Amino acid sequence: MIHPQQTSALHPAGLSVDVKELRDSPGSSETVQRTVGAPADFATPLVSIEEHSELELDLRFDSVHEGVLATGTASGQVGGQCGRCLDTISFPLTVDVTQLFAWPENAREQVDEEDEDETRAVGSDLTVDLEPVLRDLMVSALPFAPVCREDCPGLCSQCGFRMEDDPDHEHEQLDPRWAELAGLAAQLNETDDEDRSSH
């Protein structure tokens, strides 16, 4: 049995879990509760789970005929920028994990052209690597356009002013047709001035 680890220190085994004890014991299970460092690139353009920050794993591994079934949760802290106003944001993220890892001798039988990318296997050293599973789950759960709050007014599209600081901020909009007339009027005024100065 793998005993829970204290959350104050990162687990030395990281995202690798030894399942040797489950190899020949169908129906047996192990519980893994550990704090590990987040791998690099758990990210979308605006937010991420910072590399080496804490990931909390609370997982159960059950020995089944095909391999090892991992279920439970993984949690981390997300940080980054609001997609509207670019303010710093931070929020917790928890994902549910359900993944079958096939025993090495069964892995090839379960792989075909349609589900090759979805198949996970127990390593030849009888360990499972959780990184690709958590990467798929956690990165896909990150918002692509995160906001600090649903009604965030964002930035002025013309000058980048933070609209939160002055909701009444605006720019005078001239109809392009009037702008052309204003230009013609300016030219006429210049012509009149030149005519007067020549007399």
Image (cartoon, rainbow, N blue to C red):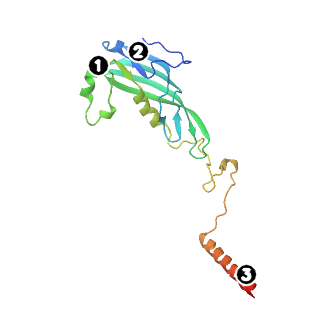
- Which residue is found at the position 40% from the left and 30% from the top? 132
Q: Which element is circle 3 on?
A: helix
Q: Where is residue 25 in the image (x, y as percent from the top left)?
A: 32, 12
Q: Which mark is residue 193?
A: 3
Looking at the image, tell me whether mark 1 or mark 3 is earlier in sequence order: 1
Q: Which element is circle 1 on?
A: loop
Q: In this view, does 75 lie to the left or right of 61?
A: right
Q: Which amino acid does label 2 sit on?
A: Glu
Q: Which residue lies furthest to the bottom in this view?
A: 199
* CA–CA distance in space, label 2 to label 3: 92 Å
* CA–CA distance in space, label 1 to label 3: 96 Å
Report whether residue 43 is seen: yes
Q: In this view, does 97 lie to the left or right of 155?
A: left
Residue that numbered label 1 is attached to: 65
Q: Which of marks 1 and 3 is in front?
A: 3
Q: Which element is circle 2 on?
A: strand
Q: Where is residue 147 in the image (x, y as percent from the top left)?
A: 57, 42
Q: Nearer the viewer, residue 41 or 67?
A: 41
The quadrant of the image that shows the C terminus is: bottom right
Q: Which of 148 and 27 is in front in this view?
A: 148
Label 3 Cα crowd, 10 Å radius (few <14 / some 14-19 / many 20+): few
The quadrant of the image that shows the N terminus is: top left
Label 2 Cα crowd, 10 Å radius (few <14 / some 14-19 / many 20+): some
Q: Residue 30 carries which label?
A: 2
User: Would you identify the image quadrant in which residue 135 lies?
Assistant: top left
Q: Which mark is residue 95?
A: none
Q: In this view, does 13 lie to the left or right of 27?
A: right
Looking at the image, tell me whether mark 2 or mark 3 is earlier in sequence order: 2
Q: Where is residue 71 in the image (x, y as percent from the top left)?
A: 41, 23
Q: Which amino acid does label 1 sit on?
A: His
